[in-house]
Image (cartoon, rainbow, N blue to C red):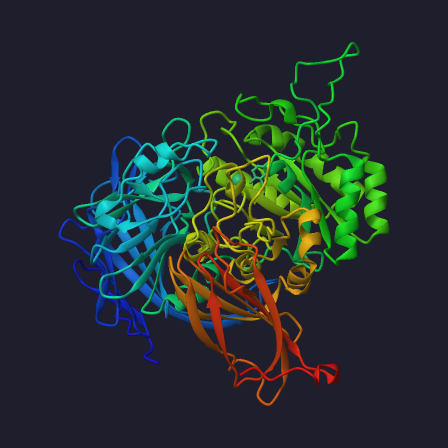
Amino acid sequence: MSMAVLHSVQAQDNKVLRASMNKVRLEFTLDDKGQPTYSVYYGDKTVIKPSEMGFTLANDSAFDKHFIVTGSETSSVDENWKPVWGEVSTIRNHYNQVTVHLKQKNSPNRLMNIIFRVFEDGVGFRYEFPRQPNLRYFIVSDELTSFSLAGDNKTFWIPGDYDSNEYLYTTSKISEIDNLPVVTASTAIAVRVAPDRYSVQTPLMMKSPDGLYINIHEAALVDFSSMQLHVDRSALKLTAALVPDAVGNKAYVHAPFKTPWRTIIVSDKATDILASKLILNLNEPSKIKDASWIKPMKFVGVWWEMQTGKGTWSYANDADTLDANGQLIPNGTHSANTANVKRYIDFASANGIPGVLVEGWNTGWEDWFGFWKEHVFSFVTPYPDFDVDGITKYAASKNVKLIMHNETSGSAMDYERQMDTSYRFMNKYGYTSVKTGYVGKIIPRGEHHDGQWMVNHYIRVAQKTADYHIMVDMHEPVRPTGLQRTYPNWLACEAGRGNEYNAFSDGNTPEHETIMPFTRFMGGPMDYTPGIFKIKGYTTVPNRQIHTTLAKQLALYLVLYSPLQMAADMPENYEKHMDAFQFVKDVAVDWDDTKILEAEPGEYITTARKAKGTSNWFIGAVTNANSRSSVISLDFLDKGQKYVATIYADADNADWHDNPEAYQIAKYLVTDKTKLALKLAKGGGAAISITLATADDKGLKMYK
Ligand code: NOJ
Ligand code: CA
């Protein structure tokens, strides 16, 4: 391994400063205008050509040029740390760091530092504004960080929308990016605000013409607005586009301050991108000292039946239709009623699923979003047909945990007023986790889901839930940037287009789940809600269907990593396929090890994971709309040990569109010498569980 080559820089301009790790190389210099520029290389290939850095501050104050370098320091770190939960039990944090101290030559001689960390799979850098007399409180009007690409990369992108990440990915060259048609067509998304048609969201996944896989994102997004990217299609250049606040400012800063890290992950292997821990490594260690109450888990929920129109979240059809006593007139379709909730508790308990989510249990759903109302929900008032005392006792008697639901419909102000009350209510009734949601336009009015105010709001929620020992899963927040390391009670986010879009829109394409791990999941776990078994034939949403086979829904438990995984379908749909549901019962949600066996964005992913504290392995393989055959080696199994592999595969005649629920289950003995041949249908997948063989398995055939 080639260690860092670090040249220190004197107080002089135009000198090049370098840092490297294995094939990744970073160069920094000031250009002839005194503007900081950096470039990134992988072996002999250019990842990022010399690209500008800096800011403009409010009142047109340029904070990008006329710099001199006043000094620099280098350091190296090689350490291991253990996440509270995760894809692997130990993470190596190995980088070479260089800090550049900059000062503007012209008055008021402001100071800025840039910190670069070079890892073997990429680069992270952040700006630091040190304490200084002439830059104390300031407003960022633009960040000028740019990423000049070396070629017209193939790109997997969603629009740079200030309020939503719930788009389908478009695959195009950089020079072809135009989000306007996508935004216009995406009518199923509640709030769409994408004023720049040439802007994209991060994590942005690219493949260069010379075969490099490049991912641009950010890490540790704290007290700053999120970074989207403006695309200069002819120059093949991306520039940071920070999400503005209600009056158009990008960020309010009080020095000393450090910005989030800008990240560039790069490799010539797609599998390395998925295995990267660079973003987690750039986040601060856990702030939660005693994490023993934080528990990854699977859950079912009173949920899909509302998504597919069988029932409603609301108790009445209309907030203004009241009886003579001023009470809501029930609509008779309210799903979160005591008897129905008990049915889910029974199913969870009978199948060893630890949690039950109940949505629509609290008052407010009659006019929950679309009116920009400030006070919508009570988070402590059940509807009359939800017997919170009885249900709590019933769940406890069945050894099931209830999961709270706090939909805010975007009224974050109102949620902040109710948070303590809500979390005390959860503590009282024994709810140990909450799913929040932000469907609708944000209040404070004019703020955006991805702006600085909301970024801080989500962190306040993570902190306050932690104070009450509550785990949290946020829907419609800003996309994650690795903060789950710092707040491990923040188990998952949605912040992407989940399975639910198959119920209320034209749905997700068969390639969607082969792109998501390279994009949305780079920042952290997603509550994608896999495990829909009834793929089509919903009378309430007749033209809708899941765009996968049933076997692929199983594979998603591996390919889409989350410590919180829903078994999203209804009990009655699972009861028709209990042999396949066995996989959902068995699959783990916390892991000692992970191997990305094969991957190509937009095409296929095969992931193997070793369940925490056991010898059991689970494998998931997914493909896009094309069928696929591949052979995977089980050489990661312990040598000389016999295992039983249970293979849940697409049936020979399965097809996501015409025959999606056809699957076959087979059991074999396997060893580390086994090469498994996988056959995936169009839009299909395969899921495999591997456990140690016992005396009872003698009758099984060895896999050939
Ligand atoms: C959107 C969320 O993604 C979904 O899971 C939830 O059921 C609805 N909002 C209602 O809160
Ligand atoms: Ca959503």
User: Residue at left 43%, top 32%?
Assistant: 187
Q: Is residue 118 visible?
A: no
Closest to the observer: 67 or 164?
164
- Side of 549 relative to 41 (left or right): right
Q: Quadrant of residue 159?
A: top left
> Where, quadrant-wise, is the N terminus in this rendering?
bottom left
Residue 205, horizontal then vertical, whole percent: 35, 55
Image coordinates of residue 523 in percent, x first then y, are 46, 54
- 591 w.r.t. 550: above or below: below
The single residue placed furthest to the left in the displayed view is: 32
Q: How many marks?
A: 0
Residue drawn at x 61%, y 79% as measured from the top left: 668
Residue in the foreground of this view, choosing between 191 and 606: 606
229 vs 596: above or below: above
Residue, x 74% and y 41% (percent of image)? 426
Residue 90 shown left or right of residue 682 in the figure: right
Q: Which residue in the rendered view is the most extreme toward the top? A: 324
Residue at point 66%, 39% (across, down) = 405
Quarter assignment of residue 139: top left
Q: Foreground: 89 or 9?
A: 89
Q: Residue furthest bottom?
A: 640
Relative to 90, is 422 on the left or the right?
A: right
Q: Position of residue 193 (x, y in %)?
A: 39, 32
Q: Where is residue 307 shown, x and y percent of the image? A: 59, 38
Is residue 527 at all visible to an observer of this figure? yes
Q: Nearer the viewer, residue 131 or 492?
A: 492
